[in-house]
Each structure stands twice: as C-alpha cells, then as structure tokens.
Image (cartoon, grey):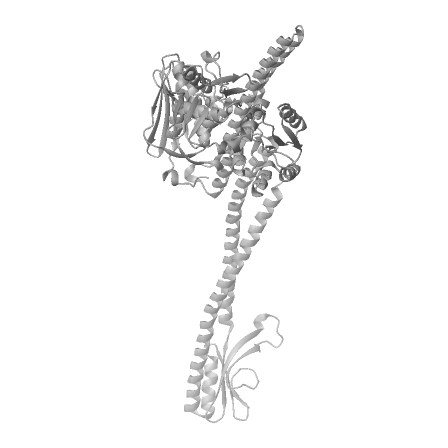
C-alpha cells in the first residue's frame, strides 16, 4: 500500500472496479486514471474475485448487481479469504436494507447509484488512506497550528483555545483526518451526523461556516476549510 | 365459469355417501332389532311345546292305552294350534295328524305339505315339533305351526323397510338441499374470484352475511375479501407511484430539455454551455432525489424494511436531529425546543426514524416565518411512544391538513417555497412501516404532527441487536 502521508493527495493507488455496465465502468476507470491511479476493471463477479485474490489492490469498487457472482458474495468470499482491502459497495437506488447488508457483508463504505464521480473519488481517496489513519489514531492530532485533543474533546490554534460545539468538533476531526483531501457533503452527513439521506436544509454549510468563523478568529496561522466547487470541502494547513 | 361439473359431482358424492351411511346404520340397527325380536318368539314357542308335551305325557301316563289315544285325538281337534302323533314302540301310528315320518327325540322343524298338490306358499307350513319317549316306549310328538311368528317377522320387516326408506328419503332431500345451498354460496365466492381475475375489477367482493348469522362459509368469504383488499391496496399503491412518476418526473425533465435546447440554439459560447450544463446537472439531481424518495416510499409501503428493525431510542434520535438543525434554525431565526426526558425505545430502523423527524423539522423550518418556535417532544403514553412536532406558525387550513401526507401534495400558498412535496408522505410511510399512527392537528395557531409508535416491551434488550 502506498503511504502518502506527506503528499496524500497525489498518492497513487491501485483500484479494482467490478462493474458489468461498460459505460459506468469506463466512466469510473477514466476518472480514476485521470487522478493518477492504476485501474483494473472486471465485468463479472467471478473475475472480480479472482483479480482481488490474485493481485493486491488499495481499494475495490464493487457493484452489487454483477453477473456470475453477486457483489455481496464476492465481498464475503474476500473477507473469508483474509483479504482486508477496503471495499466501496455500489447499490442501485435502494433502501436501508441494501446498505445494511453491504456493510454487514464486510464493505467499508457504500454509494448509491447514480453517483457523481467527485463523490466516488473522494471516498476512494478516504478509504485508500485508512490504514495510515488507523496508525494515526492517537489522542492528539495536529494540522499546522491546529491541534485536536480527542480525549478531552478540546481544540486549540497555537495557544488560543477553540470553543467548539460537539458536532463542530466531530466535523473538524473528520476534516483533519482527511486533511488535504476532498470530503463531500454526503460523507460529512454520514460520518458526523449519521444521516443517510439528503436534508434540504443547509446543515453542513451552516456548521462549516461557523467553524470557519472560529478558525479565522484565531488568526492567519489557522488551517483553512476550502470549498471545492461541485465536490465538497478540503482542509489545508495553509 | 367452468366449475359446474365438479360441484355437481360433489353433490352426487355427498348423496352416495349419505345413502351408504344410512343403509349401514339402518342395517345394523335392523339386525339388532331382528335378533331382539325373533329370539323371544322362538323361546316362547319352545316353552309352549314343552308345556304341551308335559301335559300330554301326563294324560298318556294316567289314562293308559286307547283312552289316552282318544283324549289326545280330542285335544288335537280343539283350537289350540297343536298337532300330535303317537306311535307305539314298533313305530305304528296310534293317533294324531302329523305327517308320516320317523321323529327323533327332541326339537325338529319340518315342512308340512297340507294340500296334495301345493299351489301356493300357504299350502306348505313350517312346523316345529317336540318328540318325547313315553314310559312304555311309545313316541309322542307335538307340533306347532310356526306361521304366527313368521307373520310377525314379516310385519316387522315390512315396517322396517318402509320406515328406513322414508328416513333415507327425507335425509337425502334435506341433506342435499343443505349441501346445495352451501355449494351455491361457494360458487358465488368462486365466481367473485373468477370475475376479479378475468375482468381485473379490483372492487368486487364476495357477499358476507350480517355478523349474527356468519358461519364457516362467511369466514371463507371474509378471508378472500381481506386478501382482495390487500391486493387492491398494493395495486393502487403501484398505480399511484407510476402516476406520480409520470407527473412529477416528466415536468422537470421537460424543463431540462428546454434548457438544453435553448443553450444549443444560442451562439456557441463555452461559458454559456458550462452554465447550461451545470444547471442541467442540478435539475437531474433534483429528479434523482425525487425518484429515490418515491422508491423509498414504495418500498416502505410494501413493508420491505421490517427485517432490519432493532431497538431504537426515539429520544436519542430527537436529540441528534435537534442538535443537527439548531445552527440552521438559529440562522433562520427559529427557536428549536426539545423535551425528551427519558429514553423511549421502539422497534425500528434508526436512519428511517431520523429521516422522518428531520423531514418534520425541515418542513416546519421552511413553512414558518422567522421568529417561530418549533417544539419536539418524546413522551411515554401507556403502550405507545409519542413523538410530537409542534410549531406556532400560520398552520395548515383544515381542508388541507388531512391531505398533507399525500404524495406531492402541497398547500396552495407553499407552492413557491422549495421542496418536492414528498417529505411528509415519506415520513408518513416511515410511520406506517413502524406500525405507528400519524396525524396532523391544529395547534391553534400552528401545526402539530403527532406520531404514536408502539412501545418496545422490555426496552432495548427485547430484541437482540444485529
């Protein structure tokens, strides 16, 4: 696995895409290649399972409805075979049941079709970084002058402490763990609020602007939350 | 309808079965009666013969010789119904009319041809004879005509056949008419089912009698009617979804097409194209959101989520939702108040209940003016957990209030505010999937939405978490 802690945004990964719809597969593969990743495509479940067992990938993108062997069974077989490669599970427009099934089978993330490429890309990047993230699972995490104490649930920039509400803390924590990467609005809703639907109200935007205001009040050295147009947010040290 | 023949044959089978049953029952009871009736007749006949033989033996013993023979011959001519025969030890006849033959001691039955040439059954009589040896070696036989008991038995047989025939006839008539009535009612039920399947007319129902007269057939009809109700509900729901899709997805798609056409018709300008494409993506996302909401409602109404239900704390969900929306509410100058003092457990799907409450809150935030207060309460009420979402905004007119949970229903004055018109109907579908009762009330002023969930007996330990 490529460890990209220093320049994670340019971390090159090997991604397996198991998808029988050639148009979707080509769209995903082209997008990922443009990001500099190496991509293998399997058009059915058996090929996918074979490739995943044969080679080592950083992330697997697995469609639920593929011929040969359905996505759920492939994930179960992989996990049973000791392959712990992170899997993003693609479901058709579905209800709660599909998501729960996928995660129970051993998937690490799910995405409801149709999805935008920026959403998939953000999730692939987040998952690809998971292993280093776990290593980083320490009480105190830092980004530039920003420091988060995860035990005390406190934050400070330099010497100035930052007064954050619980959800604001969680949101900032998630952004820091994915620093220099795009995090989508949907990812924030799922991880910070456990909301698996799209609220009409600007929950995320409101929280982001409050955190931004608090960070800016700490002066120049605080990291900045950038808005990535059409994709999401990104926290940078500078 | 092709079921006449089997029904006819059911009728025939019932008739044949009933006849057999009757014949067997009558046969057994007839035989028993016959035995009970004929045995005493035979016994008394034997007793009479014994008495007569005893009497005649005494006469023979006391009178001796020709006197005895004369007395016995006289006795034969009296209307006692007995016939005699006395033979000396050499076997010669001394007196009596009984036919010429060798009589063994004890009881015998013989056929006596009365006329020289028999012309009818009456000319041959069956006679029971008791023969005894006298002290001097003479044989005395006393016979009695069996005709009397035979007549008795014949009379019994006649009566028996007559009555059992009549009983069989009545039973068959009554039974068959009863069976026919039942079969006719089943035929009506089958006819209803056939009519529904051939004409597709989902409104047809089998007739059911008033409650005080209901029997098994009515239970059958009611079960079928319940099944038809459920099928009709599902069909209507599917039809409703496709109508909704046709209506509410076609409109934005038409707008999208117009927008793209307008961009294409204009001068080839990269900036203009970009703007048009971005607008198009936005519109497509709207369509997809609506589509997803419709599918979710459809799935919920079909009851597809029950399998994933687990213990859920409604108070905790309310806290999370309020926490999530409080900053947005504050920005929009709305007050959010929460009253959820204790954990309240129900069996449910957390993300669905969360979405339901979020939809209520969003609906209130969108449709009430700045300065409004929104109160969320979670309480325990007997066997239910009540979730109340109440605002002090302008409320919803009485006529509209009952309709707000319908798909795409929008109160007239809110047509211009954002929203798909699906939020509350999705919430309603979630409530129904959880077996909850949902209603909208006038909060005077404002709107109050009340959801009563069935309480999870035993709390979080009642069902094992996944």
Horizontally, residue B108 falls left or right of residue B343, namely right
Q: Quarter of the image holding residue A34?
A: top right
Q: Residue at x 39, y 41 (%)?
A: B462
Image: B197 above or below B107: above
Q: Residue at x 58, y 73 (%)?
A: B123
- A162 with respect to A223 (left or right): left
**Whether residue A140 is situated above or below residue B443 in the rendered picture:** below
x, y percent for residue A53? 62, 40
Residue located 66% across and 31% down the image: A41
Q: Residue furthest top?
A: B267
| Above/below status of B190 relative to A28 | below
Measured from the top left, where is residue B447 in percent x and y? 38, 18
Q: Nearer the viewer, residue B22 or B273?
A: B273
Q: Position of residue B167 (x, y in %)?
A: 50, 54
Question: Could you tell me if residue A66 is visible in this image?
Answer: yes
Please state the total of marks drawn on the protein image.
0
Does residue B98 sit above or below B182 in this rendering?
below
Q: Quadrant of the N terminus of chain B?
A: top right
Q: Is residue B206 visible?
A: no
Instruction: Give whichever of B428, B462 is nearer the camera.
Output: B462
Relative horizontal placement of residue B268, taking residue B422 as reference (left or right): right
Figure quadrant of residue A140: top left
Residue situated in front as seen by the camera: B401 or A46: A46
| Residue B129 x, y percent position in the rendering | 51, 81
Please name whichever residue, B232 or B380, is drawn nearer the observer in this view of the structure.
B380
């Amino acid at each position: 696995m490529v460890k990209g802690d220093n320049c994670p945004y340019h971390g090159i990964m090997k991604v397996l895409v198991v998808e029988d719809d050639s148009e979707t597969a080509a769209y995903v593969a082209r997008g990922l290649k443009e990001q500099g990743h190496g991509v293998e495509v399997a058009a059915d479940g058996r090929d996918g399972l074979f490739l995943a067992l044969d080679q080592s990938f950083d992330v697997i993108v697995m469609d639920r409805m593929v011929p040969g062997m359905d996505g759920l069974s492939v994930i179960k077989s992989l996990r049973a075979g000791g392959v712990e490669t992170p899997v993003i599970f693609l479901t058709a427009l579905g209800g709660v049941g599909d998501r729960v099934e996928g995660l129970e089978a051993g998937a690490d993330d799910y995405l409801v079709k149709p999805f935008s490429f920026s959403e998939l890309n953000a999730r692939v990047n987040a998952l690809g970084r998971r292993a280093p993230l776990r290593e980083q699972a320490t009480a105190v995490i830092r980004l530039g002058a920003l420091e988060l104490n995860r035990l005390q649930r406190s934050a400070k920039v330099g010497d100035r402490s930052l007064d954050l509400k619980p959800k604001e803390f969680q949101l900032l924590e998630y952004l820091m763990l994915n620093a220099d990467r795009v995090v989508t609005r949907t990812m924030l809703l799922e991880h910070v609020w456990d909301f698996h639907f799209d609220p009409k109200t600007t929950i995320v935007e409101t929280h982001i602007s409050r955190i931004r205001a608090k960070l800016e009040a700490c002066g120049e050295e605080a990291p900045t939350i950038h808005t990535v147009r059409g994709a999401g947010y990104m926290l940078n040290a500078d | 309808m092709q079921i006449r023949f089997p029904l006819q044959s059911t009728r025939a089978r019932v008739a044949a079965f009933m006849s057999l049953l009757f014949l067997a029952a009558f046969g057994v009871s007839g035989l028993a009666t016959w035995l009970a009736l004929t045995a005493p007749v035979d016994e008394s006949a034997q007793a009479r013969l014994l008495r007569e033989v005893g009497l005649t033996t005494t006469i023979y013993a006391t009178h001796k010789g020709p006197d005895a023979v004369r007395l016995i011959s006289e006795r034969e001519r009296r209307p006692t119904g007995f016939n005699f025969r006395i033979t000396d030890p050499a076997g010669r006849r001394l007196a009596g009319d009984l036919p010429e033959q060798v009589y063994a001691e004890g009881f015998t039955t013989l056929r006596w041809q009365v006329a020289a040439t028999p012309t009818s059954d009456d000319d041959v009589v069956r006679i029971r004879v008791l023969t005894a040896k006298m002290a001097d070696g003479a044989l005395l036989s006393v016979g009695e005509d069996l005709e009397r008991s035979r007549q008795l038995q014949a009379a019994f047989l006649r009566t028996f056949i007559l009555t059992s025939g009549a009983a069989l006839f009545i039973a068959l008539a009554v039974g068959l008419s009863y069976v026919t009535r039942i079969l006719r009612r089943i035929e009506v039920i089958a006819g209803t089912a056939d009519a529904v399947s051939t004409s597709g007319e989902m409104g047809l129902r089998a007739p059911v009698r008033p409650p005080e007269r209901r029997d098994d057939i009515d239970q059958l009809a009611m079960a079928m009617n319940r099944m038809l109700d459920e099928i009709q509900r599902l069909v209507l729901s599917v039809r409703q979804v496709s109508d909704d899709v046709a209506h509410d997805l076609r409109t934005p798609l038409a707008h999208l097409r117009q927008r793209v056409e307008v961009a294409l018709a204009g001068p080839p300008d990269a900036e203009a194209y970009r703007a048009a494409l971005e607008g198009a993506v936005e519109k497509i996302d709207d369509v997809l959101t609506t589509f997803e909401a419709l599918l979710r409602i459809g799935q919920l109404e079909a009851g597809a989520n029950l399998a994933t239900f687990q213990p859920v704390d409604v108070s905790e969900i309310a806290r999370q939702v309020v926490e999530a929306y409080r900053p947005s509410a504050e920005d929009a100058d709305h007050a959010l108040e929460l009253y959820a003092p204790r954990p309240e457990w129900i069996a449910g799907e957390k993300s669905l209940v969360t979405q339901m409450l979020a939809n209520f809150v969003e609906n209130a935030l969108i449709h009430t003016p700045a300065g409004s207060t929104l109160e969320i309460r979670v309480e325990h009420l007997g066997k239910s957990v009540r979730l109340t979402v109440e605002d002090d905004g302008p409320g919803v007119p009485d006529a509209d209030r009952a309709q707000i949970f319908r798909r795409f229903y929008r109160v007239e004055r809110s047509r211009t505010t954002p929203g798909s018109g699906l939020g509350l109907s999705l919430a309603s579908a979630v409530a129904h999937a959880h077996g909850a009762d949902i209603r909208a009330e006038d909060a005077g002023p404002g709107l109050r939405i009340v959801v009563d969930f069935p309480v999870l007996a035993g709390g979080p330990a009642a069902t094992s978490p996944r």
